[in-house]
Amino acid sequence: MLHSETGPTQDLIARLQAAVGEKRVADSQLDRSRMAHDASHYLLQPQAVVFARDGADVAAAVAAAAQAGASVTFRSGGTSLSGQAVTDGVMIDTRRGFRDVEVLDGGARVRCQPGATVRAVNARLTPYGRLLGPDPASEIACTIGGVVANNSSGMTCGTTANTYRTLSSIQVVLVTGTHIDTGAPDADEALRALEPDLYAGLLRLRDRVRGNAASVDRIRHQFSMKNTMGYGLNAFLDFDTPAQILAHLMVGSEGTLGFIVEATFDTVPLHAHAGTAFLVFDDISHATDALPALVAAGVATAELLDASSLRVAQDLPVTVPALRDLAVARHTALLVETQADDPEELRERVARLGGVVAGLGGLTDLGYPVEFTSDPGERAVRWQVRKGLYTAVAGARPTGSTALLEDVVVPMPALTGLVGDLQELCSRHGYGDTVIFGHAKDANLHFMINPDLRDPVQLERYAAFSDDLVDLVLAADGSLKAEHGTGRIMAPYVERQCGPELYAVIREIKRLFDPAHVLNPGVIVTDDRDQHLKNLKIPEVVDAAVDRCVECGYCEPACPSKDLTTTPRQRIALMRELAAAEGARREELARDFTYAAVETCAADSLCLLSCPVGIDTGKVMKRHRHDAQPAAAQRIAAGLATHWDATLAALRSGIALAEHIPAGLLTTATEAGRAIASSDLVPRVGDDLPGPGISRRTPARHEPGDVVFFASCMGELFAPAASPGATTRPRGAAFAFLRLCDAAGVRVQLPVGLETLCCGTVWRSKGLTDGLRTMAIATAVALLSASRDGEVPVVSEASSCTHGLHSLAEDVAAAGEAELASRVSRLDIVDSTRFVAERVLPSLTVPRQLGSVMVHPTCSDRHAGDVPHLLAIAQACAERVVVPDDAGCCAFAGDRGLLHPELTASATRREAAEVGRAAYDAFVSSNRTCELGMTRATGQPYRHVLELLDDLVAESRSPIPEGGRSS
């Protein structure tokens, strides 16, 4: 692993701490190493990381760094691919403290801070029927700061609704500390008064550019295409006043001109209806010839896939019928979509496009007519062919190689030739398996190569390939970067693309804004012609489970520990750093890794849902916990599994005893234990710990039924929250499930020996594999017997236990019981929310609804796709159902919230603040420990949604004997 080893100076750290506070400056090996990694193939280690709270912090940190002779780079999402978010100076994190979003003018505009993701902003806009114009593929993780700084676009927006075109105004902090709001009525007067040289310089450059006909022609041509090379020189042609020129020069400036405090966008309509078709042509020329007619007929997107892409797509787990039996030769496909506001408009658009398609030449005869489908499932399959390409190629690349996603654009007439030339170029340089795809209606192509940058021969080949690629694209009068930004990778070629005169203008822009080159030096403007080949990231081979990680950062927004310690990307990056480190540096990294990476990982595996190459970092951290467990702990865990009923009885007794100990004394005692032993072994217990639950031991309900109910031991361990106004002790979600099924006429069977069984999560999450094997086999045998080998479904009322049971076959196989595992894999394991929503709720009468209910979907709900079922039950209970925009993992994670309460506090902070902004009649979730976590975070009594439904249904029924479990 190659990166700058420049360490921080005492002077720099002292100045930064004085400027923003000691706690907001990090200079440990771990913090510097984890923040060194972004989605690009460059690696520089910062001397310090500043976690800024606001624009004032940023201004102070920039001034302090400049005084100490250090450069500054801003980092938010870290999804940039061109090296514009790495530094060996001071890195300022602008994600953690900058996530606010404010919808304006009924959704017509939206004001965003730089740390808000595109997905988060669009979630706020969706209720208004609006969206951001830019639609980058990385919308799950890329943030507004990067969207503006890179002039993001995407599949649909083209050059008409990209960041530049939809930016309404911007607030920026300049390197001098000056704060400019270009949306203010007096923006130009303020700029002239506060920064007179910059104001005059922008006017001077405007007139220089406009007075040079060749410059005007060159700019008009370059920005008629997608173009993120150099600065947005079109600002000098499109705007007259310095404030507006400044605002639009900031678009695409990649952190080299100032800090974007806030951006306000004009939004675009959200079209609720779409029709999608997959068109296969005999060759590339017929596909590109079809584009003008398709675009004129109203396609919103047209994605191109070359022959190599189609061969890869044929091997995807799910593919379109058009590819199943196709003998791909020179074929090319276009994935096209049209959008509309209502079904009738969509029918008209599809009919018009159908006529156009019928007249296209070179369409491959597939034996059936081309169809534009509006079915969500069929559309998803067609889009998966396009979106699955990156996953397939990056995930299957050779171990230790680097996934480099290139990005070029040419004038539309040159597109056909470019595809063929790129195929030949890649083959000539040894990248013969390259897939070429992209945004065809914009003539914007992407392709990925996988060089092994550890190999000097391959590095030389990559350098030669880069030079030839530049020659190829510029010969076609295209742009070397359409979407991904200039960064470090193309900075040496900016002058070649724009010419000496416009490059002089670019250098003068940099001088006006940042004469000392404090901000992101080496990005966009450089004198080093080999910069693109320096400070390359060399991936260390550390673990087959994570080696395919491309460090894209898509996992980070959902990670509950992102604001406390590390993210999945950073955990993997630190594993790689540890493999490369030596001596004292390795010792320091290893020491801090335990808490920052392993202990504070909630292991909820939400990262898996976001990862384009299918990595489950939570599972890897569980393996680290296993490796840290001594043999004695494994033996004890196995013993507990063998006597689980007695263990639970003892734990319930302890919880009952704790109820009678003064809260302050209990907290003090457990904190003392944590100090002596370990905070990862001894929980912190306070007055918010509930009392004990009710034992699952019962002689009832063992006769065959319509469903097997696997009641969770969490309901046995912890008592439920009381319903508002209740006069009797609540009995919990398990009893609610039984009563609801009784009311609907569904027969419920309990496994024999239920009190001795567990889903295994408690052992799995701690890496206690001996106990897990014992429990997995016992549970598997019991569930197979009760369900008659899967004849009826198995249901749990705790969503995390349902999720745990989905791993049961894998656990049994790991225990060496292959035949038993095969039988277990056929079990139909269903969460109680799904079962009740589909099988029980239709047979119930809910006599009244509450006014409003706040819902916390759990991680397990998301994994299983059960959020709609959770919401369906909530909607039966209340007129208004609200899921917070910032809802995420609560990180209570079984006992993790007791062992590391700081993790839950950090994970729930934004969601809790949102919950507290209004009053609700009830607060629900689908898992007892998550309810504990949310109750702790918000001060509100979270209950299982089935308990709320049961309360309401009970108002319309006669008492039914509960008989199901005894206390």
Image (cartoon, helix red, strand yellow):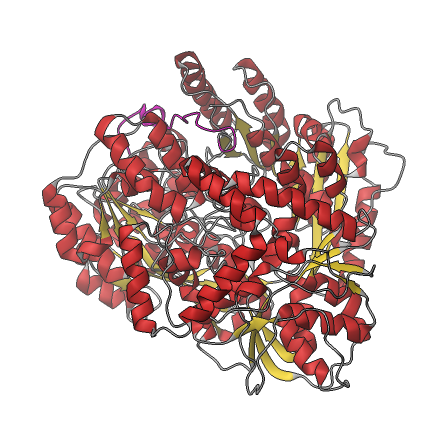
What's the magenta bit mostly, secondary-structure-wise? loop
Q: Position of residue 855 (x, y in %)?
A: 57, 70
Q: Quadrant of residue 415?
A: top right
Magenta segment, which residues?
Answer: 526-546
- For the C terminus, the quadrant is bottom right
Q: Pick whichever, 719 or 557, lies toward us.
A: 719
Q: Pick whichever, 177 or 961, lies toward us.
A: 961
Direction from residue 226 to residue 391 in the image, left or right: right
Direction from residue 791 to residue 404 in the image, left or right: left
Q: Position of residue 306 (x, y in %)?
A: 67, 29
The structure residue drawn at horizontal position 39% and vertical position 13%, both measured from the top left corner, is 456
The structure residue drawn at horizontal position 34% and vertical position 31%, both measured from the top left corner, is 578
Q: Position of residue 941 (x, y in %)?
A: 50, 76
Residue 137 in view, yes or no = no
Q: Residue furthest top?
A: 457
Q: Position of residue 157 (x, y in %)?
A: 56, 51
Q: Residue furthest right?
A: 367
Direction from residue 555 to residue 249 in the image, left or right: left
Magenta segment includes 177: no
Residue 54 in view, yes or no = yes
